[in-house]
Amino acid sequence: MSIPLLDLKAQYDSIKDELESAVLSVLRSGHYILGPKVEELEKAIANYCGVKYAVAVANGTDALVLSLDAMGIGPGDEVITSPFTFFASAESISRVGAKPVFVDIDPGTYNLVPDQIEQKITNRTKAIIPVHIFGQPAEMDEILDIASRHNLKVIEDACQAIGAQYRGRKIGSLGDAACFSFFPSKNLGGAGDGGIVVTNDEDLANRIKMLRQHGSDRKYYHSLIGYNSRLDALQAAILLVKLKYIDTWNDARRQKAHYYNKLFAGTNVITPVELNHVKHVYHLYIIRVPNRNEVESALKAKGIGCGVYYPVPLHLQDAYKDLGYSQGDLPVSEAACHETMAIPLYPELDIRDMERIASIVKEAIAN
């Protein structure tokens, strides 16, 4: 029997009636872009994250782009971020005309190493974008301290980390702004694209609201050159239903991740690190193995979904050749790209299937 890397159908089936009722309500309302349902979602997400404001946008990438733009970051500026993440983390910096500057990662958490950030700060540096990769919070105390001493903005790339906590505080409440993605595969995912920016800065929130709607705060009057980045009401309705379950789902992910850890104990499989002062939400369960290609082939041969996140670090992507990075410049990130992979993890995953998956992985390593 095949096992997918993520089973969105199982999630849908568990709350089918609520979802379909919510969608039908929007269809009957006649309000399809922004409007009351999106405003309701914004208030709910702000409350969930423990911040004052939330601005819904079209996707997680736009959330990053609009945050940078609203902060006045652009050509000639530099923004420090991770090379071990999805392309959008750096792409958003480039999209506003700024330059991404990459800092290597910790080999255990795969997050930015704070000690290396300060070495990359110049008089052009304007912000830091720590990525809470795979649902694992970055070391925000150190990052915020560095930012404060150098007068830098901090934008949390929390696209994989809704519900995660750092020293008892929800991710999203720590930086000057935080960006979430509602891509369907995320822990809190819609039935299409979606994203949101959260912040305690009223001026920043208002500016992002204008930017998402062609730089306008009233119809046909434009104060800024903006974007078309609006969330639709159908996605908002779906997300409001799912938001009620996010903590339960995240707890289930955590429990299953801990069970995987036990299954892999005493083997050559390196399992995810979870520091004592954080709450990891395991958007992906990432293992590190000495023979990834063989493990990947063995799983696929048995019909088990798996994936490589990410095969090429951002500093070595063709799109960033002009930045002048070379192989070996950020060795921890480069090694992670060659050795890590994701195996199935989602709230509905059966324990017996987990045992089967772990058995195949261990056998592939032994061979």
Image: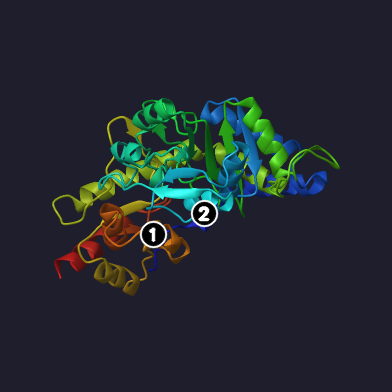
Q: Nearer the viewer, mark 2 or mark 1?
A: 1
Q: Quadrant of residue 142?
A: top left
Placement of 12 over or under 202, stated as above or below: below
Observer-nearest residue: 93 or 229?
A: 93
Disc 2, SS? helix
Give the labeled residue for mark 1: 324
Helix, strand or loop at mark 1: loop
- Mark 2 burial class by Cα count in 10 Å: few <14, some 14-19, many 20+: many
| Residue that badge 2 annotates | 91
Q: Is residue 318 above or below residue 342?
A: below
Give the residue at x 29% y 37%. Answer: 115
**Image quadrant where one finds the N terminus:** bottom left
Residue 6: % across, % down: 44, 57
Residue pictured at 70% horizontal, 46% vertical: 230
Residue kind at label 1, given as amino acid type: Gly
Left/right of residue 125 with respect to residue 61 in the rendered view: left
